[in-house]
């Protein structure tokens, strides 16, 4: 009993200190106190810095191993491996340092530290691979607290495997007694999935010039935000010695909302955003740095030495996990005129006492401008890269190619589908978009209804088309677009169709389409005015082997040439034909009352062939599911159904290697499931990702098609539009000449792009979800700066809608199927 009580007391102590925060590697944490006194000369370092409490949470103590810096401006680094293999989340940071001994600390995450030593001089670098900044501390700054449910993702398949602590000892006079230092930070980690993922957004001026002697110089940066919503909770400013004040804002509908404003000569830690601010699609993020050139005798440019300047505004944010991007940048000013309306506060310097400024830089004297040698040495101590990511373009290209060939790469879940906002698919002059496909050259083929509309007057109770007097659609109903810019490449299909529906393209580039008014299936050559093959009887609905009733889609096996037709709105079957159109077999039946069984359909609406597995998957629309069958026999193999689908699933597309893409329908009144796109692992049926448009909401997404590089197109019958989506991991690499300099540009759809000026300055800018800017390479290639100066401090220097009855308000109404055809027919 006594043992039980003792154990219980220990657990209570642990629980109490979880709530209070944690500081020491000992079994019982001491409450953190903000103090300016030096740490004890006899610091304690645990050989086991991991403390577990509960089933899912643990603390990781990261401390300098009792070091004694021998000279001022010493940078020391040490690493600690993540003690678990699976994914975890950092949800809190507790610093252990005093400004009496430590100028600042930075914590990075990476997969391979620069050294395997117990600790090392940071001249050797921090990480060999890409690194992500997780935490910054200076001048007794308070702890950076993440909001509830927010965490930095580490470990697992894609997260960092090591933490690297970098400590800058500015003035080492405090170490005259040669005491040992164990400064560091304690992390609180959890295995519980966090719904919100933290990340960094950097705003940086790259082309500001400060004339000598000029009293006030403004550096302005502004970019339109083109991603999923993010929420801001902390900010950090950075300039060199000429900076007076840095301010950041959100601009929405002309209204300026302050994110944060601070003197860059004060502690450059992350300060909390006073009032939480959300950033939505098409908001503008804006920042202004105010400089003074007084005392300088030459122009001051943006650069990497203390004699240069920088203008940085960091934002710490969180996003929903499924949309999370860990790093974003803005390096240009998209709208200079808007800064005429910037709040006056942004122009008012924040005074800082000279002794505070000296302490901030870790020196007793400020160097003179003429002391170039001193400045360069200072640069090696204080100015560095933002994120050390030296990933070669050729390596990235190679990996993308491998991803197309290897299932393990294709099914890598470290990607997110987002709208390619610059693609003009919303501006196309189309009728109701019913079908999409990609031809053998990966051009986008669109099937639309021109000036015809399917509404409640289109059919009678026996499914006979009632608007034949309108004649066939006079416009070209099949258009071929360049997938990169939506430029029209080819068009055909005029004066043939009444109500287009499904579309596919075979391996030879022939178009296969269905028409629900004609109740027919057509094969058209790309350059032929007349159909090459027609199945079904025009304008006659039926359920035998010679008739269709509002057929929805068609697919052609690239191996055997067999034709598969989903039939349809008033039949509940899949029919197989030979390559020349001879009826072979059919399967499927009407959904019975109650739970739908395998092989039963309630509008088989869309088809996706999986030729490498000899399967055909069907979007069983009104049953809100995907059913898959063997091509040879029609035998049911599997069902994929998720609550997130809601009651309707409209379309499905397959990418060779293992990905399924799908879109659902609008929720019924009172239901919560949203209309969106889905990415699934075909092998497991698991939802990997979901996506929605950013500029304009889906109304009734009707068809979807995807390519192997995860480019996705969605056609909407109500919106009469086509959306393009792309993986944030899909990069384009190209070498260009700018101002006589060879520049390697890397860009992603929807990301900020460099203009010619920023291209000259940055050299190589890596703009990618989770990426960063390698300023070390940039500064090393300009003005003869030393690359060595960027190995120390990785951020400091460069630092469709439903009616009340639940039916579609759009023309395609759910109907009672005709009796299924006998199996012998």
Image (cartoon, grey):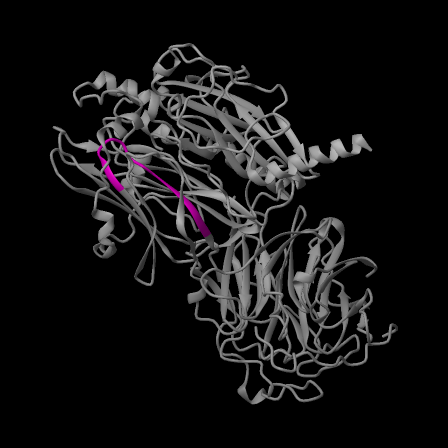
Quadrant of the image occupied by residue 704:
bottom right
Q: Residue at x 40, y 48 (%)?
A: 273
Looking at the image, residue 242 sits to the left or right of residue 20; the answer is left
**Nearest the camera: 760 or 494?**
760
Q: Residue at x 33, y 35 (%)?
A: 762
Looking at the image, residue 174 sits to the left or right of residue 460; the answer is left
Query: What x and y, as percent, mark residue 449?
Result: 53, 75
Q: Main secondary structure of the magenta part?
A: strand
Q: Residue at x 67, y 32 (%)?
A: 52
**Nearest the camera: 304 or 94?**
94
Vertical position of residue 287 compared to residue 540: above or below: above
**Nearest the camera: 558 or 484?**
484
Give the farthest residue toward the front: 2
Query: What x and y, as percent, mark residue 299?
Result: 16, 32
Q: Quadrant of the N terminus?
A: top right
Magenta region includes residue 689: no
Query: What x and y, as percent, mark residue 131?
Result: 48, 31
Magenta residue span: 231-245
In this view of the protein, can residue 88 be seen by the observer? no
Quadrant of the image occupied by residue 409:
top right
**Nearest the camera: 823 or 287?**
287
């Amino acid at each position: 009993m006594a043992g039980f009580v003792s154990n219980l007391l220990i657990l209570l102590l642990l629980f109490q200190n979880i709530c209070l925060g944690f500081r020491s590697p000992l079994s019982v944490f001491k409450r953190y106190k903000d103090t300016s006194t030096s740490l004890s000369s006899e610091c304690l370092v645990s050989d086991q810095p991991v403390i577990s409490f509960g089933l899912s949470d643990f603390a990781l103590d990261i401390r300098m191993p009792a070091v004694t810096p021998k000279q001022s401006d010493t940078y020391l680094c040490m690493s600690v491996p993540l003690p678990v293999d699976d994914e975890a989340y950092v949800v809190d940071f507790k610093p252990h340092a005093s400004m009496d001994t430590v100028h600042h600390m930075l914590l990075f995450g990476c997969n391979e530290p620069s050294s395997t030593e117990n600790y090392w001089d940071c001249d050797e670098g921090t990480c060999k691979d890409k690194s992500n900044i997780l935490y910054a501390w200076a001048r007794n700054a308070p702890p950076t607290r993440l909001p509830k449910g927010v965490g930095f993702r580490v470990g697992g398949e894609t997260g960092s495997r090591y933490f690297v602590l970098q400590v800058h000892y500015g003035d080492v006079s405090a170490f005259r007694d040669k005491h040992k230092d164990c400064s560091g930070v304690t992390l609180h980690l959890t295995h519980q999935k966090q719904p919100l993922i933290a990340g960094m957004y950097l705003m940086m001026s790259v082309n500001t010039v400060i004339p000598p002697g000029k009293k006030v110089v403004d550096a302005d940066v502004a970019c339109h935000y083109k991603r999923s919503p993010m929420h801001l909770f902390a900010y950090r400013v950075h300039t060199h010695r000429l900076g007076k004040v840095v301010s950041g804002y959100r601009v929405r509908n002309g209204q300026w909302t302050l994110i944060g404003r601070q003197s860059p000569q004060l502690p450059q830690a992350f300060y909390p955003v006073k009032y939480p601010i959300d950033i939505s699609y098409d908001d503008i993020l804006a920042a202004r740095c105010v400089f003074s050139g007084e005392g300088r005798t030459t122009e001051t440019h943006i650069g990497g030495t203390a004699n240069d300047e920088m203008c940085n505004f960091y934002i710490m944010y969180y996003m929903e996990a499924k949309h999370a991007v860990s790093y974003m940048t803005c390096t240009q000013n998209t709208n200079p005129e808007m800064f005429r309306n910037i709040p006056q506060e942004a122009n008012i310097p924040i005074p800082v006492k000279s002794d505070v400024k000296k302490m901030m830089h870790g020196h007793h004297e400020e160097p003179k401008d003429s002391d170039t040698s001193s400045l360069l040495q200072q640069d090696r101590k204080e100015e560095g890269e933002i994120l050390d990511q030296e990933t070669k373009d050729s390596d990235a290209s190679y990996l993308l190619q491998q991803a197309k060939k290897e299932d393990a790469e294709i099914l890598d879940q470290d990607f997110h589908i987002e709208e390619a906002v610059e693609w003009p698919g919303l501006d196309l002059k189309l009728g109701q978009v019913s079908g999409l496909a990609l031809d053998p050259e990966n051009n986008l083929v669109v099937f639309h209804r021109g000036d015809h509309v399917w509404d409640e007057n289109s059919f009678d109770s026996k499914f006979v088309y009632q608007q034949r007097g309108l004649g066939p659609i006079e416009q070209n109903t099949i258009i071929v677009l360049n997938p990169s810019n939506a430029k029209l490449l080819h068009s055909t299909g005029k004066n043939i169709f009444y109500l287009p529906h499904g579309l596919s393209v075979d391996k030879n580039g022939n178009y296969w389409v269905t028409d629900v008014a004609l109740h027919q299936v057509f094969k058209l050559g790309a350059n032929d005015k007349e159909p090459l093959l027609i199945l079904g009887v025009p304008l006659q609905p039926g359920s035998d082997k010679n008739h269709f009733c509002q057929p929805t889609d068609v697919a052609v096996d690239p191996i055997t040439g067999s034709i598969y037709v989903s039939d349809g709105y008033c039949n509940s079957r899949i029919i197989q034909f030979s390559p020349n159109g001879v009826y072979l077999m059919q399967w499927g039946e009407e959904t019975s009352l109650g739970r739908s069984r395998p092989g039963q359909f309630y509008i088989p609406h869309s088809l996706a062939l999986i030729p490498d597995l000899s399967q055909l998957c069907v979007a069983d629309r009104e049953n809100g599911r995907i059913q898959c069958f063997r091509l040879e026999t029609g035998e049911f193999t599997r069902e994929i159904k998720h609550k997130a689908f809601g009651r309707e699933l409209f379309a499905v597309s397959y990418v060779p290697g293992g990905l399924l893409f799908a879109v659902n329908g609008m929720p019924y009144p009172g239901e919560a499931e949203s209309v969106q796109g889905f990415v699934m692992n075909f092998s497991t049926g698991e939802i990997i990702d979901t996506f929605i448009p950013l500029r304009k909401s889906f109304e009734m997404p009707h068809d979807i098609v995807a390519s192997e590089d995860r480019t996705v197109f969605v056609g909407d019958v109500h919106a009469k539009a086509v959306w393009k989506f792309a993986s944030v991991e899909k990069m384009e690499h190209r070498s260009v000449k700018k101002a006589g300099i060879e520049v390697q540009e890397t860009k992603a759809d929807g990301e900020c792009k460099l203009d010619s000026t920023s291209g000259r300055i940055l050299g190589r800018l890596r703009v990618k979800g989770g990426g960063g800017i390698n300023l070390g390479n940039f500064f090393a290639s300009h003005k003869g700066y030393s690359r060595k100066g960027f190995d120390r401090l990785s951020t400091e220097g460069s630092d469709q809608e439903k009616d009340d009855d639940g039916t579609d308000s759009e023309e395609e109404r759910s109907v009672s199927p005709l009796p299924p055809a006998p199996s012998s027919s």
